Image (cartoon, rainbow, N blue to C red):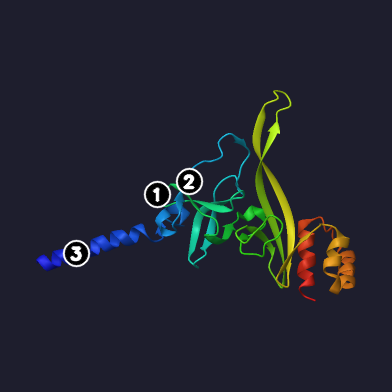
Amino acid sequence: MKNLLLCCLFLIVNLSYAQRNTISTTGKWGQQIFLSDVNGQAFTNKYDGITGSVYDQAEYQLAKITLKDGRVFNDVKARINLLEHEVNFIASNGQEGYLGKGMATELVYTLPKESGQDLQVFQCGFPPIDNQNRISFYQILLNGKTSLLKSVYKTIQERNNDLSGERYKEFATYENTYLLKDGAMVRIKKDKSSLLNLLQDKGQVLQQYINDQKLNIKNEADLIALVKYYNTL
């Protein structure tokens, strides 16, 4: 009897430990994570008094998070800090937490049907360029032998209030588009001549495709269509 009680106690302790350190389910939000699962840290607001938002999303959105060690957590409420390139998330107990720089390698949002897209993918680990390094997140506009990536990052700037003369801080947002071709990153301008120069090995064919399809390279959807066609040549 004593041995049976000890065995039951051992199972209860182990079950309790497993529940604290694995994926759990919390109602309609599906699989969630504990801070201890991912060595995450509790969120602290460092941006009081700064105008605007540091995040890519105004509200937390359902996402799949892939960690550097290969573990995957599905249906987590998350968003990206575009200043620090850290992933903020809601833990299973409702507490806000964040994954430090480089801990997450991919974040995939599940988008509402009315958006016209199913998923929105962000990844890091690309070759350094401009102010970006391997921990910087890029939105994957097109994945292929030549990929199209969008960098969105934020900085904190000080400005003067024209009426009061007081100084204040706000988040400034910057966007750049890049080609990843043959393992090299190249920032592109959204104009036809500069893009055709980068893709000059198929320049004449692409020029004809632009004319036939009446593409406007300044339009993101048309830009994606052109690079997608280039990947078929």
Q: Nearer the viewer, residue 58 or 127?
A: 127
- Rounded to the nearest angstrom, the CA distance separating label 1 from label 2 is 13 Å
- Rounded to the nearest angstrom, the CA distance separating label 1 from label 3 is 27 Å
The local secondary structure at tag 2 comes to: loop
The residue under the point 48% across, 43% down is 44
Identity of the amino acid at label 2?
A: Phe
Residue 138 appears in which quarter of the rendering? bottom right
The residue under the point 83% across, 59% down is 217
Circle 2 sits on which residue? 43
**Disc 1, disc 3: CB below 8 Å?**
no
Identity of the amino acid at label 3?
A: Cys
Q: Which mark is first along the chain, 2 or 1?
A: 2
The residue under the point 64% across, 35% down is 169
State left or right for residue 178 relative to residue 55.
right
The residue under the point 31% across, 60% down is 17
Q: Which mark is first along the chain, 3 or 1?
A: 3
State left or right for residue 102 relative to residue 152.
left
Q: Position of residue 121 (x, y in %)?
A: 62, 60
Q: Residues within 10 Å of mark 2 (few under 14, many from 20)?
A: some
Circle 1 sits on which residue? 93
Q: Position of residue 54 (x, y in %)?
A: 61, 44
Nearer to us: label 1 or label 2: 2
